[in-house]
Every structure is written in structure tokens, then in C-alpha cells.
Image (cartoon, rainbow, N blue to C red):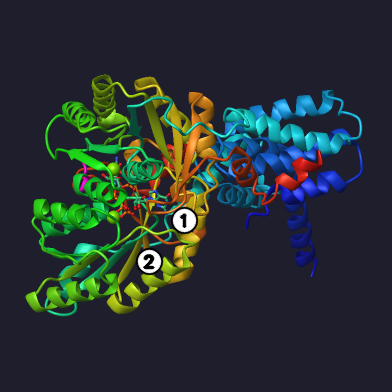
């Protein structure tokens, strides 16, 4: 019985001693330590084109994580904050495994082809990106069929046909004014009957708030039943990236994102905005106008760039 | 969605309390709205600083409350950023008038070339379009078809030196009697490998000697607008700005920034994909949009 009491006393004094050492060695982060740093970070993020809504959410997350937590005395709060920020950005940009399009297409050979549909607002780079993805797939040994389902914009058919010819992949064209869904459908049938393993469907650029055109997109999706609906976003986009991503995702469901024109030297905040808005994987970055200018997305690299 | 600063204005106008505190609270809301509209962050800070100074210093004229006057100051300072209250001059001051369209990839140059052609054809001018974009597949066919739709003459070559093509196009179209000639160019941003594309743009400009270089800028562009506009401006001085894709949800603050750094006037806005969807720029309506307010008129009329 005495033994147990002594044990308890020992434990208590140990606890107190550790408490004293702790208060000497550690300190608690107070809101006022954080505020100026977080204010700066918010501005930095916004200047890097992270949409205000996304930047505020990220900063709030970091604040919540750190307020009241304890750090070693002598350790600069700034470093702790930057570490937390890095982790938050990485978690946001890297929501899980990314599909291997070539592998999945190969696995479909002989059956229903892998159908990938590209969508987005006007001029983001959908058609060019399709050419790049076609080039990549062809190099990986799974030549895709391209469906030129932009039957609206002047020159869209000629643009895609010229790419297809240069890359050496088949294309199914549509007449201007024809129903884009039926062009996609024809391309899938064509691929299936000729033994192609993938179909890339180009769609006309459209505003995410144009209800007629969004309805048309829904119809293309219904008819072509794509395995992947890839949203193409221009990396020069500011706050509107959130709106684009959210509304397209609500309208048809987005499975992955490709961000283009990264060679125009943006800081990369647009990627954060899109990831914040829809939490879907970013698959590739467009880095130029050539066919080789398609890079697998590397979240680490983007985060480093943002935190530079 | 376009509630924006309307609530902040209402709060500011109705709210009591210390004037200076109310000004600061309002300016914080204003800063957020301007940032959401993609106005350059540094520009946001500097414009709100000037507003604050004036708001604390100026005495409103008799019969106007300090708070109403403050909103007037906000409007004036924003309007100043893009060159004033006047509606832009869109009529060519002389003929022939040569417009060179430049801008980043996909911003809407070729479509806008078609729209401008349509606009001037409808006003009775003989218009010619020149395609000098040898980079983007289909660019030639795109402009050719738009020229047909607009009722304009067309000249283009698919391959060769863009500057020479542009010059030949201009000469031929002038010979055919064009009064307004619009030269479409390939998209470019000028960074890294594309530095040489700025050279190309300079070469085109030096061969066609345009009366007006128009920067075509996407309403959704973010913070990069400033440095891009500066780069373009350094290569070929920008005389006017056309904002495209105003029919989406973007508010166009990047274009405002571009106007501020180049000193160029915003002339037109594009509000859709079809040729008729081009409007002369209306400063008031644009400020209202940047601010996320539907109705600025009624307030301004009251003051
Ligand atoms: N520098 C650069 N330019 C690109 C990139 N991706 C696309 N572009 C250019 O952007 C412009 C528009 O590309 P498109 O592929 O026609 O865009 P889109 O989304 O299909 O356009 P619409 O069909 O009209 O909506 C073209 O000049 C492309 O060469 C990129 O990664 N870097
Ligand atoms: N919704 C909408 N789309 C527009 C507007 N202006 C242009 N577009 C679209 O934007 C896309 C790109 O337009 P283009 O005229 O090809 O752009 P560009 O600047 O010539 O592109 P490059 O020559 O590749 O640099 C097309 O889909 C156009 O239809 C506009 O005001 N509203
Ligand atoms: Mg396209
Ligand atoms: Mg063009």
C-alpha cells in the first residue's frame, strides 16, 4: 500500500518537473504571434493568383491548426507557419492517385474504348491539349481517335484536323452546325469498329453560366458517357477559376483537371483555386504550344514555386 | 452573386459611429471586392490609400453628407484608373485606319477581329481583315470565315514570315479600297521560349505601322495582367484595350490593371461569341461591375 502511494507521489513530482521543463522549453503560439504572418501570407497567395476565397480558407486552416499549439522556444514562429502552409497546400493539390490514361486505354483494347472528354470556357487550350494527349497516347502505343465535336467555332474543325494530321491520328469530323453529341457518338462507334482503344472528345468552349450551352454539354456527356471529363483551365485565370471549376463540376461532374499556358510564367495560384473549389486531381500542365509540352503535374514543384 | 460592395456601401451610408472608423471598415470591404475582381493587389492598395486620404480631407459641398461624398470619391478614383468618365472614341479619326490586334494565346483576338469588322461594316466602312497567324493551326480558316460572315475583305497566307504577310495584306487591301484594316496576329506571352514572339510582334508593327495597337485581354485574367500588359506595351506601345468574355462571371479587374499600366483606353468589350456581341466600353457600367454593384447610377445621381 505504501509502495503504491510512493509510486503515485513519484509520478506526480515527475509530472510537475516535466511541466517546469516544458514551460521552459516550449511556448504556446498566440493569435497575435500569427496574425501579421498570416496577413502577409494571404497577400502573397492572392498575388500568386490564388482566388481570395481559396486563400482565406487556407490561411484560416493554418491559423486553426497552430493557435494554441506549442513550439520549442527559440524556434521562429515564421518557420512553423510556413511548414504548416506547405503541408496544407500539398494536401490540397495532391488529393490522391492520378490515373494512368495510356495504361487504362490499353486495358480497353478490344472492348469499349476509353472515352475522355475535354471541356472548359473559351480559349483555355482544350483543342491544343487534346492534340498533346493524342500525341502522348500515340507514343505510348495506344493511338486514339479524335472526335471534333466543336461544330460551332469558326476554324475549330480545321484546327483539330491539322493537328490530327501532323500527329498521325484518325479524326472524326462534324459539319459546322451539326449536333456535337452525334459527332462524339460517331467517333466512339468508329473507334470501336476499327479497334482503337481511346477516343478524345473536343468540345466547343463555353461559359459555365450559359445555360443553353451547358445543357448541350450535358447532352454530349449523356451520349458519349465518358470515362473521364477533364476540365481545361488557363493558368492565367484569376478569381474566376473557382467559379469555372465549381459550375462545370456541378453541371457535369469533373474527373480531372489540366491547367494550360503554365509557360506564361504564372506563379501557379490558379491550380490552388481549382483544387480548393472542386478537390479533383490535376493531371497535367500545358507548358507550351508544341506537342511535347504536356507535363505530368508535380504538386511538390508547384508548391515550391508558390512559396518561393 | 454580384452583391459585392453594395452591402458595404449600404452599411457605410446608413451606419452611425465614427466617420474615420467607418471609412476604414468600408475600405477593407472595398479591397476585398477589388481583389476578387482581379485588380492588381498593389493597385488596390494604392487606390484605396488615395481614397482614404481624400475621404478624410475633403469637405463635401453643401447639402451632401460626408458619407455620400465618400462614395463619390470611390467612384472617381476608380474611373481615373482607366482614363476617365468619357465614353471612348470608336470612330476612326481618319481613313484608312489600321488596327493591329495583339494579346495572349486564346484571349479572343481573331474573334474580336471579326467583331470589329462587323462593327465597322455596319457603320458603312469598307473593312479588310489580315491573318498573319502562321503558328496556330486553323487560324487562317477561322479569320477567313469570320470575314465572310462580317462582309469584310480578307487577306491571309498560311505560311511564311508574319511581318511580310501582314505588309502584303495591308497593301493589297488598301488597293482594294479598304478604309479600316484590322490585322490579326498569333497569340503570345513573351516569356521563356516565346521571347522571340515579341520580336515577331515588333516586326509586324514596324512593317504595317498601325494607327492603333489594340491589346485584347480576357476578362478572367488574374494578377499576371500587369506584367503581361507591360511586356506588350514595351514591345509595341498599346493604344487601346478590348476586354473579351465579359459574358462569363469574371469581373475584368485584370483589364483595368492593364489600362492603368499602359495608359491605354479601354474601347470595347466582348460579350459573347457571335460577331454582333461587341459593345463600346461604358466606364460607369464597368466600375459597377468591378465593384460588384448592379446599380451605381442611382447613387451617383443622388450626389
Ligand atoms: N503558350 C501556350 N499556349 C497554349 C498552351 N495551350 C494552348 N495554348 C494556345 O492557346 C490558344 C488557344 O488554344 P485552343 O486549343 O484553341 O483553345 P480551346 O480551349 O480549344 O479554344 P476554344 O475551342 O475556342 O474554346 C492557342 O493559340 C494555343 O496554341 C500552353 O500550354 N502554352
Ligand atoms: N463567351 C465569349 N467567348 C469569346 C469572346 N471573345 C472570344 N471568345 C471565344 O474565345 C475563344 C478564343 O478566341 P480566339 O479569337 O480564337 O482567340 P485568339 O486570341 O485569336 O487565340 P490565338 O490566336 O490562339 O491566340 C473562342 O472560343 C472564341 O469564340 C467573348 O466575348 N465571349
Ligand atoms: Mg477548341
Ligand atoms: Mg487567333
* Residues drawn in magenta: B135-139
* Residue A225 shown in magenta: no
Q: Callout 2: residue from which chain?
A: A
Q: Position of residue A171 (x, y in %)?
A: 14, 63
Q: Are marks 1 and 2 on the same chain?
A: yes
* Marks 1 and 2 close (CB-CB < 8 Å): no
Q: What element does badge 1 sit on? A: helix
Q: Position of residue B173 (x, y in %)?
A: 22, 33
Residues under labels 1 and 2: Cα distance?
12 Å
Query: How many numbered discs?
Result: 2
| Tag of residue A275 | 1
Whichever of labels 1 and 2 marks the residue nearer the N terminus, that label is: 2
Is residue B82 toward the left or the right of residue B18 in the image? left
Residue that mark 2 sits on: A255
Q: Residue at x 24, y 32 (%)?
A: B177
Is residue B229 toward the left or the right of residue A159 in the image? right
Q: Position of residue A180 (x, y in %)?
A: 28, 70
Eyeballing the image, is B263 above or below A81? Answer: above
Eyeballing the image, is B165 above or below A156? Answer: above
Amino acid at each position: 500500500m505504501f509502495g503504491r502511494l510512493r509510486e503515485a507521489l513519484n509520478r506526480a513530482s515527475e509530472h510537475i518537473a516535466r511541466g517546469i521543463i516544458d514551460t521552459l522549453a516550449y511556448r504556446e503560439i498566440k493569435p497575435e504571434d500569427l496574425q501579421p504572418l498570416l496577413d502577409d501570407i494571404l497577400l502573397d497567395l492572392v498575388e500568386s493568383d490564388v482566388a481570395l476565397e481559396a486563400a482565406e480558407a487556407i490561411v484560416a486552416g493554418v491559423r486553426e491548426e497552430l493557435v494554441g499549439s506549442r513550439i520549442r522556444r527559440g524556434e521562429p514562429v515564421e518557420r512553423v507557419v510556413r511548414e504548416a502552409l506547405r503541408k496544407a497546400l500539398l494536401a490540397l493539390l495532391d488529393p490522391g492517385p492520378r490515373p494512368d490514361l495510356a495504361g487504362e486505354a490499353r486495358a480497353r483494347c478490344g472492348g469499349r474504348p476509353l472515352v475522355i472528354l475535354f471541356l472548359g470556357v473559351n480559349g483555355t487550350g482544350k483543342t491544343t491539349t487534346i492534340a498533346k494527349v493524342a500525341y502522348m497516347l500515340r507514343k505510348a502505343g495506344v493511338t486514339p481517335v479524335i472526335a471534333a465535336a466543336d461544330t460551332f467555332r469558326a476554324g475549330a474543325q480545321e484546327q483539330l484536323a491539322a493537328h490530327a494530321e501532323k500527329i498521325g491520328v484518325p479524326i472524326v469530323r462534324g459539319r459546322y452546325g451539326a449536333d456535337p453529341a452525334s459527332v462524339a457518338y460517331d467517333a466512339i462507334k468508329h473507334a470501336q469498329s476499327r479497334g482503337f482503344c481511346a477516343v478524345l472528345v473536343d468540345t466547343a468552349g463555353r461559359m459555365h453560366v450559359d445555360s443553353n450551352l451547358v445543357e448541350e454539354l450535358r447532352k454530349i456527356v449523356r451520349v458519349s458517357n465518358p470515362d473521364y471529363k477533364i476540365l481545361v483551365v488557363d493558368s492565367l485565370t484569376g478569381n474566376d477559376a473557382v467559379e469555372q471549376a465549381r459550375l462545370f463540376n456541378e453541371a457535369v461532374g469533373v474527373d480531372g483537371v489540366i491547367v494550360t499556358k503554365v509557360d506564361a510564367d504564372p506563379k501557379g495560384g490558379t491550380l490552388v483555386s481549382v483544387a480548393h473549389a472542386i478537390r479533383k486531381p490535376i493531371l497535367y500542365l500545358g507548358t507550351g504550344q508544341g506537342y511535347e509540352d504536356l507535363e505530368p503535374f508535380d504538386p511538390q514543384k508547384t508548391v515550391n514555386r508558390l512559396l518561393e | 452573386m454580384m452583391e459585392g460592395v453594395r452591402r458595404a456601401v449600404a452599411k457605410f451610408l446608413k451606419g452611425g459611429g465614427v466617420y474615420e472608423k467607418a471609412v476604414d471598415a468600408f475600405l477593407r470591404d472595398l479591397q476585398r471586392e477589388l481583389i476578387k475582381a482581379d485588380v492588381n493587389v498593389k493597385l488596390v492598395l494604392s487606390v484605396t490609400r488615395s481614397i482614404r486620404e481624400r475621404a478624410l480631407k475633403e469637405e463635401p459641398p453643401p447639402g451632401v453628407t460626408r458619407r455620400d461624398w465618400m462614395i463619390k470619391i470611390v467612384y472617381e478614383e476608380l474611373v481615373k484608373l482607366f482614363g476617365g468618365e468619357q465614353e471612348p472614341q470608336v470612330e476612326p479619326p481618319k481613313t484608312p485606319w489600321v488596327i493591329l490586334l495583339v494579346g495572349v494565346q486564346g484571349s479572343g483576338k481573331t474573334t474580336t477581329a471579326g467583331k470589329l469588322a462587323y462593327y465597322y461594316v455596319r457603320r458603312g466602312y469598307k473593312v479588310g481583315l489580315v491573318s498573319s497567324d502562321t503558328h496556330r493551326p486553323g487560324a487562317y480558316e477561322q479569320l477567313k470565315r469570320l470575314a465572310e460572315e462580317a462582309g469584310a475583305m480578307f487577306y491571309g497566307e498560311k505560311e511564311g514570315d508574319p511581318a511580310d504577310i501582314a505588309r502584303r495584306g495591308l497593301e493589297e487591301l488598301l488597293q482594294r479600297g479598304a478604309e479600316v484594316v484590322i490585322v490579326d496576329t498569333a497569340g503570345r506571352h513573351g516569356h521563356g521560349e516565346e521571347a522571340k514572339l515579341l520580336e515577331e510582334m515588333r516586326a509586324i508593327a514596324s512593317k504595317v505601322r498601325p494607327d492603333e495597337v489594340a491589346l485584347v485581354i480576357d476578362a478572367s485574367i488574374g494578377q499576371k495582367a500587369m506584367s503581361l500588359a507591360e511586356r506588350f506595351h514595351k514591345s509595341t506601345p498599346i493604344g487601346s484595350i478590348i476586354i473579351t468574355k465579359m459574358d462569363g462571371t469574371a469581373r475584368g479587374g485584370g483589364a483595368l490593371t492593364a489600362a492603368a499600366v499602359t495608359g491605354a483606353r479601354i474601347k470595347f468589350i466582348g460579350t459573347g461569341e457571335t460577331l454582333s456581341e461587341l459593345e463600346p466600353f461604358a466606364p460607369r457600367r464597368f466600375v459597377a461591375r468591378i465593384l460588384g454593384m448592379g446599380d451605381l447610377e442611382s447613387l451617383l445621381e443622388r450626389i
